[in-house]
Amino acid sequence: MKKLVILTGAGMSAESGISTFRDSGGLWERYPVEQVATPEGYAANPKLVIDFYNTRRKELLHVHPNEGHKLIASLEDFFDVTVITQNVDNLHERAGNKKVIHLHGELTKVTSSLQPNNPAYIKTLSPDEYEVKMGDVAPDGSQLRPFIVWFGEPVPMIEQAICHAEQADIFVIIGTSLNVYPAAGLLNYVPDSVPVYLIDPKEVTIHSTRHVHVIREKASNGMKELKNILLNNN
Ligand code: APR
C-alpha cells in the first residue's frame, strides 16, 4: 500500500461548525491569542484560559465529522493513511482514521501545569469531566491544564510528523493557512518526487518552489475530487 500523509488545519473542521482561526470572524478575532493561547496568558489568568478550552471542549459534544473527514477515513481501504493534524478536535478519530498525529494537542485531554508533556500526567477526559475547574489537580498537585500546545511552547509530536512526511508517497494539505511553524514547514521534508495536493477554498501562500496540485474547494468537495484522482492514478 502506498503511504498517504495528510496535513490538516482548521479549515478541515469548518464544515462541521468549528471556527477557523485567521479567517474573518475566526477565533483569534474574537479572543486575543496572547490571552488564551500562550503560557504567559495562562500564568496571568488561568481561569479565563481553562474556561476558554472548556467551551471548545464542550463544542465537541455537538459537532460531527463532515464528509471530508469521512472521505479521508475511507481512503484507509486503499492507502496506508497517516493524518497529521493541527486541530485539537477529535473529528478525524471519530470519522474512523486509525493513525492521527495531533501537533497542537487534544481538547479531550488535560495535563499537569508543571510538566505538560510528561506522559504520566496526560489524562483523557470522559464527557462528564469536560468542564475542568480551578482546583482540579494533576497527580503532581498542579492545576490541570488543557493538553494544548500554546504559542512559544515545544511541539513534541513534530519529530514523528517529520518522519511520516519524509516517507510519504503522496502528500496532501487541507484547510490550513500555513502560517504556523513548525507545522507549515513539513512540506519541506516531503521528497521532491512525491505528488503534493492542496485543498482550500482560498489562495494559500506556499513557501516552497515545488509543484503543488491545488484544488480550490472546501474540504468535503475537495476530498471528493481528490479521492477520484487518487483512485484513478494509483
Ligand atoms: N474547507 C477547507 N479549508 C477551509 C474551509 C473549508 N470549508 N474554510 C476555511 N478554510 C481554510 C482557510 O481558507 C484557511 O486557509 O482553512 C484555513 C484556516 O487557516 P487558519 O485559521 O490559519 O488555521 P490553521 O492553519 O489550522 O492554524 C494553525 O494556528 O492558531 C493556531 O494552533 C492554532 O492549529 C492552529 C494553527
Image: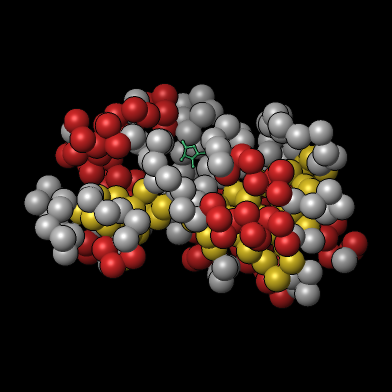
Q: Quadrant of ligand 1?
A: top right
Q: Is residue 198 above or below residue 131?
A: above
Percent of width and height locating residue 41: 27, 31
Colour treatment of the image: secondary structure
The answer to whether residue 50 of the structure is visible from this angle is yes
Percent of width and height locating residue 215: 78, 42
The answer to which of 24 and 170 lies nearer the viewer is: 170
Percent of width and height locating residue 54: 26, 48
The residue under the point 64% across, 41% down is: 185
Percent of width and height locating residue 21: 48, 33
Name of the residue lying farthest toward the right: 233
Question: Is 44 on the left-hand or right-hand side of 27?
Answer: left
Question: Is 93 on the left-hand or right-hand side of 176?
Answer: left
Name of the residue lying farthest toward the left: 135
The residue under the point 57% across, 68% down is: 99
The answer to whether residue 225 of the structure is visible from this angle is no
* Quarter of the rendering containing residue 166: bottom right
Question: Is 126 on the left-hand or right-hand side of 170?
Answer: left
Of the 4 image quadrants, the one containing the C terminus is bottom right
The residue under the point 79% across, 48% down is: 196
Q: How many marks?
A: 0
* Quarter of the rendering containing residue 52: top left
Of the 4 image quadrants, the one containing the N terminus is bottom right
The residue under the point 83% across, 39% down is: 210
